[in-house]
Amino acid sequence: MALAHAVSRMGPRFLLVQENGLRSASLFLRTNAGLVEQRMHDATVAGLVVTARTLGVSHCAVHSCCESSTLRSELSHALAPGASVETLSAHAIVSGAIAFSDSVAEEDGLWHGPALSSRVNATQRISYTIHRPVRAVFDADELTLSKVVGDRPVLLAVDAHIDALHGEAIRNYARRRLNLRGIVHVSPAEGEKSWSQVESLCQAAVDAGIDRRGIVVAIGGGVTLDIAGLAAAVFRRGVGYVRVPTTLVGLIDVSLGVKQAVNACGRKSLVGAFHAPIACINDYQFLQTLPRSEIACGLAEAIKMALVRDAVLYDEIDREALQLMQPAVCASLSARDIWFRAETLMLEELSSNLYEANLARLVDFGHTFSPVIEASSDYRIAHGRAVALDMLLSTGIGVCRGICDPALFHGLARLLDRCQLPVHDAGLPRIETLHAALDDARRHRGGNLNLVIPVRAGRAVFVQAVSAEEIAWSLAAMRSAAEEWRMSAAHADVA
Ligand SMILES: NC(=O)c1ccc[n+]([C@@H]2O[C@H](COP(=O)([O-])OP(=O)(O)OC[C@H]3O[C@@H](n4cnc5c(N)ncnc54)[C@H](O)[C@@H]3O)[C@@H](O)[C@H]2O)c1
Ligand SMILES: [Zn+2]
């Protein structure tokens, strides 16, 4: 009798004694996934009987070449009433198994069942604190960082500019309060946000003897945080990671989520990982030395959140922009209230969607065209400036299709201009390139464009298709806004 036939009339479990002398018996289980074989080496008759009883085996087949009357009678006693023991020839076993399932085959004397699936269910609990200590993070008496890392081995990854400004304080603190194993300088140029810097950091971690308990502490702007965060994500398949952001973009944006990435294959932030930090330590005093152009980039991210979520905050930033651009004000307690509100909005959006299961994200406002704007300018246009251009371009598209009031577009353009952010740039990619960038955005967002367009301050919608004509219309509006102000600035100079 063919095995397939045997299987079809057997219960869900049956025993097949396949080889001579019981040296290798096989227990076949019929499951929803198909035929599963469990090999039992050096089986004994008693062992097989126990197995048959335990598993409620309803049918036994004994290979014809190992037929043993003892085995047959012992097994038939072990089976439930009505069950049977029979003898199968080697040929019947093989052909029957193949007939039973195309994917059952015998190779090198082993039975290979059908492609079997196994499910692994696990949940990872993500929990980290964004600390905002009152004292400077590297003040000798400030313990937040030392408490966060404890006695774990630490590799410091420091933004080269931050090292020049704060290197001594960082080293003094690290020697006194941390289990410091090494310090690496990260080049913070966007054009060097590359895999080679991640690899250098991994090499430094090896040289410093960082083990799996080790922690990478990144101190710097978004570029440094992205490079060090990715190194922490991949080194020994993941070690601890602590962020100490030092730019406004770093503080109100990069520090909050679980993403890190570097630029690759001519694409912005193409290669990356989700790797939650152990903690972030946000110290706004770093902002005192931040150039205005970098404050402007941070303001672009704050404007982004306010414009799609919070009209009151948007108005406040609109009123205070000129003040906020001054480093001393930017680092002050009064400004921190604004930064904190922008961070809270960002966190609300991120924390319920940390791994981006939902790819329609309001935080992507200003981040659809910006990757191609940055990459095609060879990273001359900084991230925050590209975000500003993208926000205005997207808003203009909204005006073009009549879902957004032109006053919002002009108000945003004026605000960006006050923040010394561009409303147009001669280095913007061509219309076809910007239009093609939408396909890349779709690939990144599960097939949907999800372009975020504000409809009024505090509220935005997702748009799924945009034409090249709409992009052209919006670019023209941006260009004429830029020209208008250049002319009025020239008039003001003459006056
Ligand atoms: N992973 C994320 O979730 C995420 C989110 C937003 C942005 N980003 C990335 O962040 C990067 C932009 O970050 P960024 O705007 O901080 O730029 P950045 O890291 O390039 O820093 C800007 C410049 O400021 C210098 N600097 C840093 N801190 C300073 C300080 N306190 N005083 C004086 N100079 C200082 C840096 O050395 C650098 O020259 C982009 O690559 C962007 O893709 C990542
Ligand atoms: Zn951004």
Image (cartoon, rainbow, N blue to C red):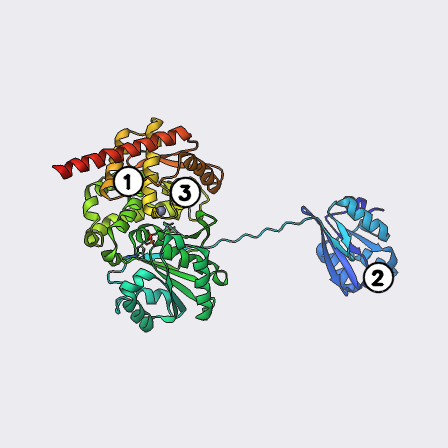
Q: Residue 256 or 84: which is nearer the viewer?
A: 256
Q: Which mark is residue 24?
A: none
Instruction: List the residue tagged with mark 2.
Output: 20
Instruction: List the residue tagged with mark 3.
Output: 372
Q: Is residue 447 left or right of residue 38?
A: left
Q: Is residue 334 above or below residue 234?
A: above
Q: Residue 335 or 59: which is nearer the viewer?
A: 335
Q: Residue 327 or 282: which is nearer the viewer?
A: 327
Q: Is residue 444 above or below residue 37?
A: above
Compute the Cα span from label 1 to label 2: 78 Å
Q: Is residue 236 above or below residue 34?
A: below
Quadrant location of the C terminus in the rendered image: top left
When asked about the image quadrant of residue 137, the answer is bottom left
Q: Which mark is residue 310?
A: 1
Q: As shown in the figure, which amino acid type bears the numbered disc 1?
A: Asp
Q: Is residue 275 left or right of residue 73?
A: left
Q: Residue at x 75, y 64 (%)?
A: 41
Q: As shown in the figure, which amino acid type bears the numbered disc 2?
A: Asn
Compute the Cα span from label 1 to label 3: 28 Å
- What SS does tag 2 mark? helix
